[in-house]
Amino acid sequence: MSESEVDTSRTVVQTYVPAYQREAWDNHAEELGMSRSEFVKSMVQAGRRVFEDEGAVRDGTDTGTDPSNGASPPVEEGPPLEERIRTTLRESGPLSWEELFAAVSNDIEERLDETLTRLQAANEVRHSGREGGYVLEAGGPE
């Protein structure tokens, strides 16, 4: 699909989360100087990139481990997904798709948050509403 064919109109996306999760998102968004909507949109896009990168590693198309291509290495993973699923189900019993997804993806969210916090503290990354998300700071490590 060419850029001229992309539908750029805005639309509403609605989801339901526990109150404590919304409060945590609101607090984090406030710390970053973002609206809740902007925060959720940025986190979803960041999470999609993580899952796309993990898919590339699984299917052999990942180039992130080749330092000659200038790409970053893949995000460090915890236990393999299969083991996280087994452990979660062993400890929790039957779970719906949504509950299982929330349980196994939580560590990705935590690692992303911790990593972004470190990168921002080191002035390597900043969030820019004008640029539509997180950006590398000029003059930071290559």
Image (cartoon, rainbow, N blue to C red):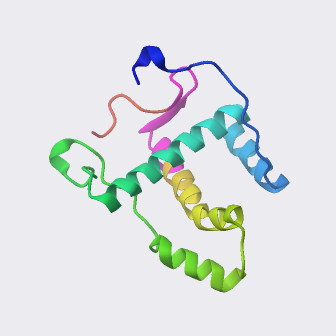
Mark yes or no: residue 91 visible. yes
| Residue situated in front as seen by the camera: 137 or 58 | 58
Instruction: Name the spot of residue 41 as percent of width and height, x first.
Output: 62, 36
| Residue situated in front as seen by the camera: 107 or 139 | 107
Instruction: Name the spot of residue 1 as percent of width and height, x first.
Output: 41, 25
- 37 relative position to 117: left or right: right
Residue range (magenta): 117-133
Which of the 4 image quarters holds residue 43?
A: top right
- 90 relative position to 121: left or right: right
Answer whether residue 130 is magenta in the image.
yes
Look at 80% across and 49% down and name the residue there: 16
Mark yes or no: residue 32 visible. no
Which of the 4 image quarters holds residue 58?
A: bottom left
| Residue situated in front as seen by the camera: 48 or 5 | 5
Look at 52% across and 53% down and name the residue there: 112
On screen, 14 above or below 2? below
Look at 56% across and 52% down and name the residue there: 113
